[in-house]
Image (spheres, rainbow, N blue to C red):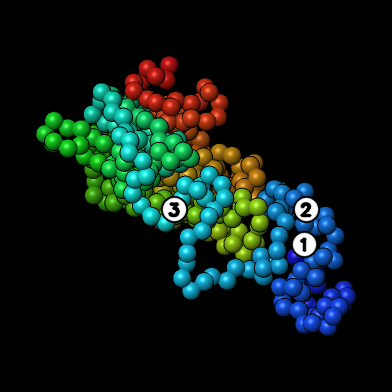
């Protein structure tokens, strides 16, 4: 516990001195080592539980680690553990020569059922229900490096899912679209001729796009770039968790106030982000915030107090009840319950 370590750091009341038996003055790192040897072993074993995350806390393995990381003047790459440590590199481009597959439809989606990937699958299913738009969807297994093949890099030079190719008769080369919000906007502008999912009215269209990109800018604080990364880490850093928990709760309050009609805008008050009209803003926000709100009793959901945002929870369930949303979550999903998976999608009948 922090208070025990602090008590050892602040003085020598526990018998720790700043010199060893031979009288040689110890460096700070060595003093940490000497001090921590006096802490019972159970305080640092993997069985010790984090108050915040309810996960095993990794033992601090060295005095240098306890002192913290001092960045060098110039960062240099080094070997990193784990799947993502090996996949993530400080350079772009293809690492393997392999084309992406192509099906019979004009639209070819390359994705995976992550929060960003689900946006594309859900909206394409919405377009099918409204306009009978068909498409092929191919899984890009990001844990195996599919995003770094030459074919996918040609679709998205940033090597992120989802990405889309649109083959048209009047163009020799297909239109490529990458970044999830760009995919939603492109599909809406191209196929949503009756403006079911993006309003025609300029003010409402601006509101829709504003909320769409609110999600793009806000979600990193919730996901792997912020709260999720620090909350699920083996070593819990209180200041980092507090920083991102505060911001994520503020974001949920932004949504809750808007959906509850408390932010003063005429589009607020629900049942959707733009009032009565369900739009691509709902799709984008739901895959990140709606899915979290539907699981308020999870470890992180309880920690963040997600049940205290009733307007978000009601909206999340309303979106989840849509048939297209239920199908779209399965597109390019290759884990979990087999009944919820659909690795490839080539026809509406694939869900039957």
Sequence order check, earlier mark of 3 and 1: 1
Q: Which residue position holds label 1? A: 1
Sequence order check, earlier mark of 2 and 1: 1
Q: Position of residue 184 (x, y in %)?
A: 32, 41
Q: Dot 1, how many residues are within 10 Å of its Cα: few (below 14), some (14-19), or many (20+)?
A: few
- The quarter of the picture where the C terminus appears is top left
- The quarter of the picture where the N terminus appears is bottom right
User: In terms of depth relative to the viewer, which is nearer, 240 or 200?
Assistant: 240
Q: Which residue position holds label 3? A: 89
Q: Residue at x 67, y 50 (%)?
A: 53
Residue 309 shows in this picture: yes
Q: Dot 2, how many residues are within 10 Å of its Cα: few (below 14), some (14-19), or many (20+)?
A: some
Q: Dot 3, how many residues are within 10 Å of its Cα: few (below 14), some (14-19), or many (20+)?
A: few
User: In terms of depth relative to the viewer, which is nearer, 237 or 307?
Assistant: 237
Q: Residue at x 25, y 23 (%)?
A: 104
User: In terms of depth relative to the viewer, which is nearer, 246 or 307?
Assistant: 246
Q: Which residue position holds label 2? A: 45
Q: Position of residue 158 (x, y in %)?
A: 34, 49
What is the distance, in whole Å, between disc 2 and disc 3 at their CAs?
A: 32 Å
**Is label 3 or label 1 in front?**
3
What is the distance, in whole Å, between disc 2 and disc 1 at their CAs?
A: 12 Å
Tags 3 and 1 touching, CB below 8 Å:
no
């Amino acid at each position: 516990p922090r208070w025990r370590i602090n008590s050892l750091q602040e003085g020598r009341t526990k018998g720790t001195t700043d010199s060893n038996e031979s009288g040689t003055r110890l460096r700070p790192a060595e003093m940490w080592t000497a001090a921590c040897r006096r802490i019972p072993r159970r305080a640092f074993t993997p069985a010790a539980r984090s108050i915040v995350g309810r996960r095993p806390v990794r033992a601090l393995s060295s005095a240098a680690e306890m002192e913290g990381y001092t960045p060098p003047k110039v960062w240099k790459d080094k070997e990193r553990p784990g799947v993502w440590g090996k996949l993530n590199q400080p350079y772009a481009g293809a690492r393997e020569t392999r084309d992406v597959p192509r099906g019979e439809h004009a639209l070819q989606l390359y994705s995976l059922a992550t929060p960003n990937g689900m946006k594309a699958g859900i909206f394409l299913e919405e377009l099918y229900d409204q306009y009978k738009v068909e498409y092929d969807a191919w899984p890009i297994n990001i844990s195996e490096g599919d995003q770094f093949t030459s074919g996918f890099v040609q679709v998205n030079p940033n090597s992120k899912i989802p990405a889309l190719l649109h083959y048209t008769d009047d163009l020799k080369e297909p239109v490529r679209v990458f970044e999830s919000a760009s995919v939603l906007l492109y599909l809406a502008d191209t196929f949503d001729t009756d403006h079911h999912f993006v309003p025609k009215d300029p003010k409402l269209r601006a509101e829709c796009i504003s909320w769409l990109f609110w999600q793009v800018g806000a979600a990193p604080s919730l996901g792997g770039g912020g709260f999720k990364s620090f909350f699920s880490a083996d070593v819990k850093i209180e200041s980092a968790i507090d920083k991102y928990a505060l911001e994520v709760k503020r974001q949920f309050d932004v949504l809750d106030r808007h959906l509850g009609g408390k932010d003063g805008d005429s589009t607020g008050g629900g049942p959707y982000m733009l009032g009565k009209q369900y739009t691509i803003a709902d799709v984008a926000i739901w895959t990140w915030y709606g899915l979290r709100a539907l699981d308020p009793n999870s470890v992180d959901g309880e920690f963040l107090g997600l049940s205290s945002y009733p307007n978000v929870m009601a909206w999340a369930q309303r979106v989840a009840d849509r048939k297209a949303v239920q199908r779209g979550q399965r597109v390019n999903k290759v884990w979990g319950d087999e009944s919820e998976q659909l690795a490839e999608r080539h026809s509406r009948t694939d869900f039957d």
